[in-house]
Amino acid sequence: MGGSAVPIRTDILVAGAGASGLIAAIALARAGHSVALVGQSPGPLPGRTVALFEGSLRLLDDLGLREPLDDISAEVMGIRIIDDTASLFRPPPALFEASEIGLDAFGLNIVNDDIVARYIEIAAATPAITRYETMIESYDFRDDGVTAKFVDGRQIECALVVAGDGRNSLARSTAGIQVTEWSYPQVAMTGILRHRRSHDGVTTEFHTRSGPFTFVPMPSTDEAAHRSSLVWLMSPAEATRRMALSPRELAAEIEEQSHYRFGAVEIEGTLGAFPMACMRTEKLTAPRLMLVGEACHVFPPLAAQGLNLGIRDSTDAALALEGVDLSDAGAIEAALAGYERTRRADIDLRTRGVDLMNRSLLADVLPVDLLRGMTLAAVTAIGPLRRAILREGVSPSLARTLGAFVRH
Ligand SMILES: Cc1cc2nc3c(=O)[nH]c(=O)nc-3n(C[C@H](O)[C@H](O)[C@H](O)COP(=O)(O)OP(=O)(O)OC[C@H]3O[C@@H](n4cnc5c(N)ncnc54)[C@H](O)[C@@H]3O)c2cc1C
């Protein structure tokens, strides 16, 4: 169809068919809006899994999106942190168990591509969603609506855009939302591992001078009883060297780095390498635009926060727009303002927290080591603090409370 044809019309255009865009599209459809989901199926993210915590799983459950993940995920029942920095102020290893806060598991670990594949199927079966497997080339944001042009020349008109179009968001840059970005001298190597000894349902995170080296539980298969996903942060030079090793040579380095805790290791499938960066956006909204997921926050995978935050963005976006008459510009503006207030504190808290944690590992400075060691030791030893932090980690409420406080 050429550019001169009659434009497609919809209530809301969701840009991007990654995990955040898919969840936003499904949540908005469940909230009663007609949705055009525009985006090609994302390419594979080799070795990438996401740990989704209890709070996120409850939000997904409300949308009927949790049960479809059950047979492709592994429960994370504990988190072990081992300081492997050789610092003078190394705290002892700490094991945090879900049972301490009355849960069976902190959450589930799932292959990123599998989540996307399952949610694409669900979006396709949702009558209020029309999927366009193409990319958006340009936007025209006006006072009375938005026109977007697809790369194939088709045009679409809508009342509002919810952009889950990732860290280089075209919707964000077209709307003139400024970003602050910084990078770290780190690359995350990701992969799926088979290993001799069991992970016992526990994530093991070694804190090294180049960042965390983490084994996260994966479900067993007919071929392998014990499997984990690997997230290994290292310098770009080490990443280049290790990506060029044979699978057996790399497995030997992984065994050594893990202090042989899981026995012999075998690499399953393809590895990934992702440069680490952080991004904060000046705003989360612009007239007739809401940002969700990595379109409005990027940071390293310490403490597994990224998509957990993206799920809260997407479900809060749908909540802000529930019952809103999209022909009423004032009502849209009020919903956008509500979303901006609700999400800002949560996003800032996670972005700053992860940045601080990552810098404290990279610092190699005694006072910083002392502070990091004391913090972990205090969190480990002081029961109520320990439980409060675990609860905040799996089911965040602090930022929501702060958001509500700022509102009044
Ligand atoms: C090593 C690593 C480990 C991680 N582990 C965890 C974890 O354990 N837990 C966790 O919660 N998070 C984790 N994360 C973060 C998580 O993976 C991301 O937050 C999440 O995948 C981002 O999804 P998204 O949908 O927001 O963005 P993306 O996956 O980037 O999707 C954006 C989509 O938009 C599309 N798009 C872009 N431009 C256009 C356009 N013009 N038109 C249409 N479509 C467009 C793209 O093609 C893409 O499909 C990890 C990240 C890394 C790097």
Image (cartoon, helix red, strand yellow):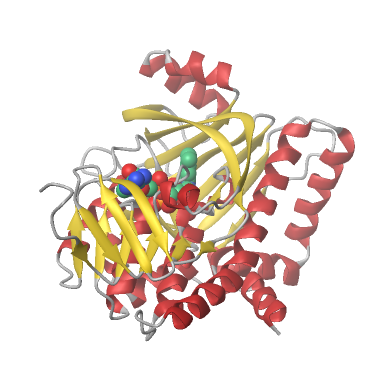
- Left or right of 333? Residue 362 is right
Visible residue check, residue 50: no
Left or right: 151 as drawn, with respect to 381? left
Asked whether, in this view, residue 65 is left or right of residue 75, the answer is left
At 23% from the left and 54% from the top, the residue drawn is 155
Q: Residue at x 84, y 33 (%)?
A: 88
Residue 191 x, y percent position in the rendering: 39, 33
Q: Is residue 359 left or right of residue 327?
A: right
Q: Residue furthest left?
A: 1
Q: Nearer the viewer, residue 35 or 182?
A: 35
Q: How many marks?
A: 0
| Rendered residue at 71%/77% (across/down) | 406
The x, y position of residue 105, in whole percent, is 47, 64
Q: Give whichever of 263, 97 is nearer the camera.
A: 97
Image coords of residue 308 (percent x, y)? 48, 59
The vertical placement of 188 against 28, above or below, is above
Residue that lies at the very extreme toward the right in this rendered image: 367
Residue 23, above or below 241: below
Q: Quadrant of the C terminus?
A: bottom right
Residue 313 visible to an observer of this rendering: yes
Q: Position of residue 87 (x, y in %)?
A: 80, 32
Front in this rendered view, residue 186 or 149: 149
Q: Looking at the image, which residue sits at the far front?
A: 4
